[in-house]
């Protein structure tokens, strides 16, 4: 073994490989995408089968088949992907599994790159699945191995819920020796076990209740992932590591100061009245809390660490509650720990005040940080006269400049949106967007995304607009990867229910938003196999979409004509705007043209190129013409030579 700096997602991948995982399936979604990508690097050495499934539901069902046979399986997704997978996951909770199955659902507090801030810990309770909540990459590495063991012990899928700051944090750890995966299991027919019937679900529900309400709470109370600070030897405690939100830097380790704060935090004697409240935390919030206590120089502050939020370690928590009069809870997203502690105080008739999100002590939304927790601590902790809190005057840092995300220079989506905008000028329209880079089509100056709900909703929402207002031109915009993931059913629904709409498929030959993963239309699998590309055109034609027009969006004249033709056709029509993502274009054989320049003699400073396209390579120059108007200039380091601005320029000044 050798010490290496390991990213949280890589640690999860290594833990799964160390556990001998046989099959891994998932759908890309930040912040979880690197897990499968890292596992794929070692597939030849371990013999693990890896795939990017068309969506999370498919991934869960593929894994279920292998797990029924006794093989260990891993499913990866982000929190909104768990919504897509919820149908099979809920059923798997009742049917159970044979080989260990771990579902990684990466939550995204903030949210940083998601539609929602939903909390997988609540889904665990809803679906009745055990859940592990790691605080550090090393914890995630160890937890996922234990999760596989727990899964097989109780024949149930198990959830692992890392958050963005754990997924993308780095920690120094031993890189394990990787061996071949476990021998694949053999499926044994047993319809009484594997076919879900109402009566079997009823019996399984009783078994699950017994497990989650009586067995696991006691077992988890003795788990190394749940403890009161100072109650375990330091060498047994996971290394507290995380990403420091305030500075934008990661902490490789919180080091001795954090460990000291944890080791010195011992519970108050039963019956005594502590001068300061105790604390409870889980996930990355625990790391923030321990660092905040260390910075403030606070010692002897008891901290309850929760690493298995469901089933909740009730016996451990009850003992902790009996020793304190007030507890402040720090956690990201929903008040899961807080509500469990409140429930226990009521059931056990414990006189302990619980403070957190519900009473406004802790922010109810967004990420926490060391700074946020530090400020809260100073409002609830009684500081001794000698002064345990350092009183330093800090100069507030200036606000960071607002930098909204933009489509890349040379992005084909900009050209696609612009073509539709030009073709539909003056007409009553609605533009339904979807999840992907092209959501940025909502930004000015394009302003071409009126709605964005969830993956695949663009196609079906456009149908709702049409049936409500038949005189409105209804457009939907969806990427090629998203089309395969959740768009096809919407197309079938549109044709079957006789909607009139134009489906715009922005085909850039990759899954760009999450890191350029392959999909069924790319002709490459995660196993490295070259396969037949699934044709979007043939799918649309088979469903009954007419016409289906494929056009290069950078040929604006042809693109505008295609939009005009498709929009005036009765029924469901489609335009496939096909051009590679500029980030991978050269990898797929595209030769980059020379960067364009502005002829200052012809430029009249109208700024039409900037005002209508918003390309980041275009900017206003300090140079002025004879009329005093500032001219336009092109940043050659950004320009890809796509020629869109050249086609827009009214004077031919761009060459």
Image: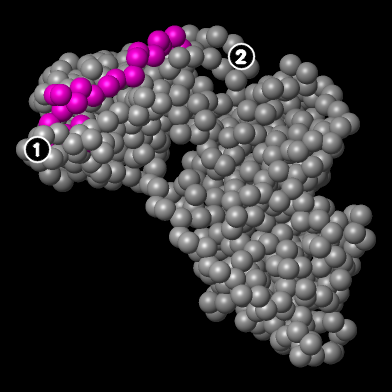
Q: Is residue 384 above or below residue 165?
A: below
Near-viewer residue (413 or 345)? 413
Residue 263 at x, y percent in the picture: 87, 66
- Element class at badge 2: loop
Question: In the image, what residue occupies the spot 12% across and 28% down?
Answer: 423
Report the side of 108 relative to 471 (left or right).
right
Query: Residue 282, located in which quarter of the rendered image?
Result: bottom right
Residue 476 visible to an observer of this rendering? no
68 vs 243: above or below: above
Can you tell which quarter of the image residue 301 is in? bottom right
Q: Is the magenta stretch mostly helix, strand or loop?
A: loop
What residue is at 49 percent from the left and 53 percent from the top? 111
Q: Distance between the residues labelled 1 and 2?
A: 59 Å
Q: Does the magenta stretch include residue 600?
A: yes
Q: For residue 627, which numbered disc appears in the image?
A: 1
Q: Residues within 10 Å of mark 1 (few under 14, many from 20)?
A: few
Residue 617: image tag: none
Label whose residue precedes the other's in the sequence (1 or 2): 2
Q: Which of marks 1 and 2 is in front?
A: 1
Q: Kindly state the secondary structure of the residue where label 1 is placed.
A: loop
Instruction: Say which residue label 2 marks.
Output: 528
The residue range painted magenta reads 588-610
Please report the residue visible at 12 percent of the width from the left and 44 percent of the height from the top.
Answer: 469
Query: What's the residue at 14%, 34% (across, down)?
Result: 625
Picture coordinates of residue 28, whole percent (x, y): 53, 33
- Return the residue found at the far front: 626
Q: Which quarter of the image is occupied by the N terminus?
A: top right
Q: In this view, does 566 lie to the left or right of 22?
A: left
Residue 201 lies in magenta, yes or no? no
Along the line of sight, the residue nearer the viewer: 506 or 205 = 506
**Residue 317 relative to residue 92: left or right:** right
Return the x and y of residue 139 as percentages of the image width and height.
77, 49
């Amino acid at each position: 073994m050798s010490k290496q700096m390991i990213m949280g997602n890589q640690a999860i991948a290594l833990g799964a490989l160390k556990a001998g995982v046989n099959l891994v399936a998932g759908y890309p979604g930040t912040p979880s995408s690197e897990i499968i990508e890292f596992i794929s690097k070692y597939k030849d050495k371990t013999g693990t089968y890896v795939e990017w499934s068309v969506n999370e539901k498919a991934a869960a069902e593929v894994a279920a088949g292998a797990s029924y046979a006794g093989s260990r399986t891993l499913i990866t997704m982000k929190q909104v992907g768990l919504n897509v997978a919820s149908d099979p996951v809920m059923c798997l909770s009742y049917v159970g599994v044979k080989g260990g199955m771990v579902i990684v659902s990466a939550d995204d507090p903030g949210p940083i790159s998601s539609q929602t801030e939903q909390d997988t810990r609540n889904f665990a309770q809803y679906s009745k699945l055990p859940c592990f909540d790691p605080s550090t990459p090393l914890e995630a590495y160890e937890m996922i191995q234990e999760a596989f063991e727990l899964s097989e012990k109780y024949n149930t899928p198990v959830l692992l819920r890392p958050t963005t700051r754990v997924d993308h944090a780095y920690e120094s750890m031993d890189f394990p020796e990787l061996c071949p995966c476990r021998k694949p299991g053999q499926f044994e027919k047993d319809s009484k076990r594997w076919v879900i019937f109402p009566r079997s679900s009823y019996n399984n529900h009783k078994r699950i209740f017994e497990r989650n309400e009586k067995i696991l709470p006691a077992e988890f109370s003795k788990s190394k992932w749940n403890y009161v600070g100072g109650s375990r030897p330091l060498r047994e405690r996971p290394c507290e590591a995380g990403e420091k939100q305030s500075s934008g830097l990661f902490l490789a380790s919180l080091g001795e100061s954090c460990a000291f704060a944890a080791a010195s935090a011992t519970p108050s004697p039963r019956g005594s009245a502590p001068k300061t409240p105790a604390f409870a935390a889980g996930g990355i919030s625990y790391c923030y809390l321990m660092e905040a206590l260390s910075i403030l120089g606070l010692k002897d502050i008891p901290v309850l660490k929760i690493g298995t939020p469901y089933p909740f370690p009730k016996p451990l928590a009850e003992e902790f509650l009996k020793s304190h009069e007030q507890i402040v809870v720090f956690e990201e997203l929903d008040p899961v720990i807080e509500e469990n502690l409140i429930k226990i105080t009521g059931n056990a008739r414990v006189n302990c005040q619980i403070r957190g999100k519900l009473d406004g002590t802790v922010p109810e939304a967004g990420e926490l940080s060391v700074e946020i927790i530090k400020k809260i601590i100073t409002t609830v902790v009684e500081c001794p006269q000698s002064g345990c809190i350092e009183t330093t005057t800090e100069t507030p840092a200036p606000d960071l400049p607002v930098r909204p995300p933009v489509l890349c220079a040379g992005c084909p989506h900009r050209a696609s949106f612009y073509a539709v905008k030009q073709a539909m000028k003056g007409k009553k329209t609605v533009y339904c967007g979807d999840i992907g880079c092209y959501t940025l089509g909502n930004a000015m100056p394009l302003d071409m995304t009126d709605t964005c709900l969830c993956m695949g909703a663009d196609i079906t929402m456009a149908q709702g607009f049409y049936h409500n207002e038949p005189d409105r031109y209804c457009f939907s915009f969806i990427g090629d990867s998203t089309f395969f993931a959740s768009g096809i059913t919407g197309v079938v629904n549109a044709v079957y229910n006789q909607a009139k709409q134009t489906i715009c498929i922005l085909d850039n030959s990759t899954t760009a938003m999450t890191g350029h993963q392959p999909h069924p239309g790319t002709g490459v699998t995660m196993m490295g196999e070259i396969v037949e590309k699934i044709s979007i055109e043939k799918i649309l034609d088979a469903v009954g979409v007419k016409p289906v027009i494929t056009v290069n969006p950078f040929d604006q004249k042809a693109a505008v004509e295609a939009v005009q033709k498709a929009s005036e056709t009765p029924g469901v029509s489609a335009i496939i705007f096909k051009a590679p993502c500029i980030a991978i274009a050269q990898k797929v054989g595209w030769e980059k043209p020379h960067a364009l320049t502005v002829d200052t003699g012809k430029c009249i400073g109208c700024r039409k190129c900037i005002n209508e396209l918003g390309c980041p390579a275009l900017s206003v120059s300090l140079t002025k013409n004879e009329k005093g108007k500032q001219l336009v200039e092109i940043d050659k380091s950004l320009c890809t030579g796509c020629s869109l601005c050249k086609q827009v320029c009214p004077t031919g000044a761009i060459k």
